[in-house]
Image: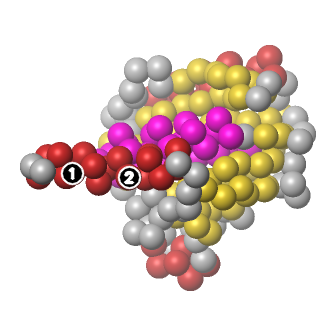
Amino acid sequence: MTPNQLLVLLLLIPLFSFSQGATHKMTLLDGKLELTIPNQLSTMSDEDFHQHFREGASKPRFLLTDSTFEVTFAAIPTTVSLKDDDMASFALFQYQDVRKQHPNTEFPPHAHGTLMVNGKKIGYLKFIPHSPSRTGFTSSFYVLVDGKVLVLSLICPQTMQKTWEPIADKIIQTLRIK
C-alpha cells in the first residue's frame, strides 16, 4: 500500500465507522430533539473546555469533541423566533452576515440553503473563515424547536473537512424533533 492510499484510508475511517453503526443516540432540550452521533465524539468536560478554549469563553450546554479536541459539535439555543417558512431567509441572512463581517471567509459551492429532514425544514451554512484567530471548516445547521432557532455546529480543521463534512451531514439526517 502506498503512503497516499494509506492516508486516504485513515481519513475515511471516521466516515466508515459512522455508517457501520459505531454511533449512539443523544437527546437534547429535555428530550425534544434526538440525534445519532458517531462514537468518535463524546461530551467535553468543563476542565477540557477551559484548557482548549480562550479564557472567558462560555461553554455550550451541549458540546462534544473528538479525542484530539480538534473536532467539536455543539448545540446552541438562541432566542430567535421563526416559522418554517422563514428558514430559507434566515439561512441566507446568516450567509450574508458572515460574508459582511468576515470578508476573507471562503464558502464552498452550495454554502447555504435549506433541506428537509424527517419532515422538518432545516437551514444550513458552511464556510471556512480565514482570520488570524481562526481557520477551519464550520458546518452549521439551524433547527426550529418550539419556534426558536437551535444552532447545531460542527467545527474541524480545514484538513479534516473531507472527512467530517459528510459526517456532519449524516448527523443532521438522523435529527428527530418531538
Q: Position of residue 103 (x, y in %)?
A: 38, 31
Of the pair 103 and 110, the residue shown nearer to us: 110
In which quadrant is the C terminus drawn? top right
Residue 147 found in image quarter: top right
Give above or below for 76 relative to 90.
below
Q: Is residue 141 above or below residue 100?
A: below
In this view of the protein, can residue 135 be seen by the observer? no
Label 1: element kind: helix
Q: Amino acid at mark 1?
A: Leu
Residue at the bottom extreme, as displayed: 47
Residue at 48%, 33% (x, y): give it.
126
Q: Which residue is label 1 attached to?
A: 7
Instruction: State whether residue 55 appears in this view.
Output: yes
- Crowdedness near tag 2: few (<14), some (14–19) or many (≥20) residues, C-alpha within 10 Å: few
Q: Point out the residue furthest to the left here.
A: 2
Q: Is residue 152 magenta?
A: yes
Q: Which residues are magenta?
A: 149-174
Please give left or right for residue 85 compared with residue 168 in the image: right
The residue under label 2 is 13
Q: CA distance from mark 1 to mark 2?
A: 10 Å
